[in-house]
Image: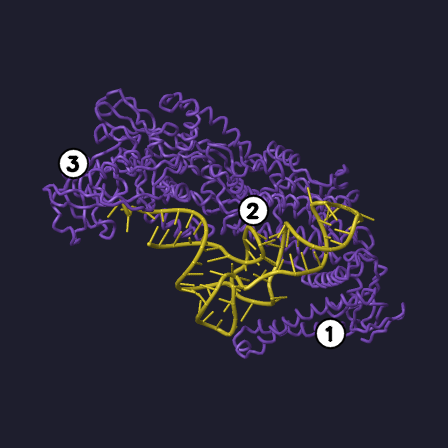
Chain colours: A purple, B yellow
Amino acid sequence: MFEGADGMADGPKTAELPKTYDPAATEERWYRTWDTSGYFRAVPDPSRRPYTIMMPLPNVTGELHMGHALNNGVQDCLIRWSRMRGRNALYQPGMDHAGIAVHVVMERRLAKEGLTRFSLGRERFLEETWKWREEIGQAILGQMRRLLLSCDWERTTFTMDPGYSRAVTECFIRLYHKGLIYKGKRMINWCPKDETSISDLEVEHVQEQSTLYYVRYPGAGGSGGIVIATQRPETILADVAVAVHPDDERYKTLVGSQVIVPIVNRAVPVIADRRVERGFGTGAVKITPGHDLLDYEIGTDHKLSILIAFDPHGRMTMGGPRYEGLDRMEARQAAADDLRSAGLLVREEPYVTNVGRCDRCKTTIEPYISDQWFCRMKELAAPAIRAVRDGRVRFHPERWTKFFLDWMEQIRDWNISRQLWWGHQIPIWYCECGEMIAGVERPAACPKCGGRALTQDQDILDTWFSSALWPMATLGWPDETDDLKYFYPTSALVTARDIIFLWVARMIMFGLELRNEIPFTDVYINPTVLNIEGRRMSKSLGTGMDPLLLIDRYGADSLRFALLNRCTGEQDLRFSEKMVEDTRNFANKIWNAARLARLHLEGHEVPAGQPRDARTLPNRWILDRFARTASDVTAALEAYEFHAACHRLYEFIWSEFCDWYLEMAKVDLEGTGTNPGAAAETRHVLGWVLGQTMALLHPVMPAITEEIWQALPHRGETVMRAPWPEPPDTWRDEAAGTAMAEVMEIAGAVRGIRAELGLGTQPVDASLHVGGPDRERVGALRPYLARLVRLDPDRLPLRGLDEHGPFGISSPYGRGRIEIHVETPELRAKARGRFEKQLASLERDLAGVTRRLEDPAFAQKAPAEVVAADRARAQGLVERRETLRRYLADLAPPSRIAPPGSGGVRPR
RNA sequence: GGGCGCGUAGCUCAGGGGUCAGAGCGCUUCCUUGACACGGAAGAGGUCCGAGGUUCAAGUCCUCGCGCGCCCACCA
């Protein structure tokens, strides 16, 4: 009857288990065991399929936040699940040097001592930053462990490790030689605070209240001139023209004439250009090619000269003593004042505009002309677009595909150089003779003049340039290592949506360009963690929560489940501590179910293998439910529907297993059932199902599941390597489901009546009334039913449908009824109220179905099975209505008080 | 200016044409029985944002509004 003879002979240790689960000690203990046992290691093994996840590398700027907890929780869930499914799972950890982000942190620290990076100098600054990195790096690794991540820590990589740096350099050189990287003077986004250029993606646009100034530029010949509108009067100093639309009748005669730029009194031409919007402002626009992108383009096309009004700190360099040295914002005021007193300020109006800000330090960005390195993107984007279109790279949820493609199709060149120090210096050397030399290593001499006085380009690369290599560089690229050949392309990339362009897109492009292969097959975009008010969790907003604190309080298992339980992918996740507390309660529930199991398994020989041919109803039913659960959970994980997996596990464990199965199983475990051999069978099923359930839950809650799994009959060393439960469809047991539905209905009827009548715990007699054909079946359920409704089995006799007990208040179920044998007029009235309510609700349902069935269009057009189902339903409702009516008639006043013991007073 | 997502019980959210709209929390009543009071049982609670439309059938699909959130964008 049972297979698997190699179970644990004496089951769990006998130590008394506490009533509440202690996550801290358990998590710490198991994590250490897993780590030292090498369970996290992943090495190439051709006999198994790989499954690889590259952790989105956290910045070495601070502590992990809730977003990391969710993101890493998802990944570890996928990794642990895949490992149990027999895949060779690699979870690659590491950290990003995060150039500009770290600069901002370091400068803030230096500022407290009155220093800047410039006063410190490049060498010292880098030394200090390395120290900081060591410190924070250790802290972050410790935090990842607290999350119970099953990373291969021996592979931990930092983006400035020597090997990684070599990959970055190699990539630059290859792209450079292919002409995909070039240097040039272009208009870029300049942050005057960080004193570096940043890419378009690092500028965030914020709506701000501003002023639109209408300024008159007098005609050079003393005529009226022209009025323009500008938000930035300080840039007037660098104006080189005024532009109007060629078809604008208002200004046709002015085109070609000269006007005087106020303040600096310079004569500039009025030009015509189609890019000017006639409807905005006055339809005339000042042209400042040095400080505006559109002006730059117009200026270039019209071969205008370029004037630059401020230096890299954002301080004025034009306008004489009145202006020079002023900050650009101060200069704006000064210019407005000067224009006003000169009588050239025609009008000022409030204006809402979008201002570009540095997403790291929030300083207003200046469009600025500067010598920079760029990466050509159209060529790199084309193959990436194809890969996503073909479905070689798939986004989950699917809608992110369009989001990705829309951006890729209008991609522009990428400014990759930064005027910062912390990062990968650009591998370009300049000779005194003017030659520019690219090389992975420092060249010994200039190939053109032989000179040895070479200086390396001072700029470093955008951090995202190096992160783009993450999936390859961690595996040894540019060398064709065994790791690279085996683990690449990786499986799933799990990340937040805000770095789809910054990171995901660039990994795909670089992967295809450098190795002609996609970096991963699936991209799962996880939700954003919000606080309960729906605001983004952020330290600077004061809305952040510390995951470590929550782990201290409730355990990492609970934190992980709480997050994944709400991880739909479709919707952002409003999070509160209460959710973790609720999950802690769930963990405690599981713990206590396990305590119950141990109590009954202890001292018995219980096989570890899977049970077959269970005979008792609870056992048959729970095996059926488990099989369905396992298949539902697998399907959910395959679809990246973590919330669905969690919901199913929660429902199975709490409702099906604990509330119903365990309560019924107690009957057999305690030997009070009628089924011989039921106790042994139940021990086997109980131990096995609970162990398998722990396996199913393990990817989400690693520690508690290991603790319990170890305490049950099992095979193998760890649940981490237990096979993923995949019960065959043949386990489905429809009959058990039907029988259980009847049990649930009877139990529900009795409990309902009892609660409604306020009987409390007072012992009552009851009887089950069933017709001949159902007698045997229901009779067998009697011990379970008695247990479920907390009645003494001896006081729940089985009787015929036409029999009546004393003082009975009946409740119908299916084709039978149950009577509770107490009676007072008050109780009768209460019972009547209950049944009347049931009847009313039933009538409503019946009316609905009847209306539909009577509609000829429905019968004609709806599928036959839908019609048949409705007919059956209507039939059932009618039968039930009859029963309810009968019992209501029984209860109708005046009540017949029957003497005790005189059965059958009530006619059927 | 374009695009995306969301609006379902007091709260957080499932459900995405076919039974009566679900869960957890919260709330009410009862219960300390030997797994668990971080618990058990029974309940109350919903014009599924609004208006049209498609369909035998609409939280569910379409159109248009309204409200929230996010992303992209060189009208100065």
Point out residue A355 in the picture as x, y percentages from the top left corner. 34, 42
SS label for mark 3 = loop
What's the chain of the residue with tag 1? A
To which quarter of the image does residue A702 belong? top right
The residue drawn where x is 75% and y is 59% is: A755
Whether the residues at callouts 1 and 2 have beta carbons within 8 Å, the answer is: no
User: How far, Cα to Cα, is label 2 from label 3?
Assistant: 65 Å
Point out residue A802 in the picture as x, y percentages from the top left corner. 82, 73
Residue at the disc numbered 3: A265
- Kindly identify the amino acid type of the residue bearing the numbered disc 3: Asn
Q: Which residue is outermost to the left?
A: A221
Precedes in sequence: disc 2 or disc 3: 3
Precedes in sequence: disc 1 or disc 3: 3
Residue at the disc numbered 2: A564
User: How far, Cα to Cα, is label 1 from label 2?
Assistant: 48 Å
Residue at the disc numbered 1: A885
Residues at marks 2 and 3, common chain?
A: yes
Whether residue A215 appears in this view of the structure is: yes
Whether the residues at callouts 2 and 3 have beta carbons within 8 Å, the answer is: no
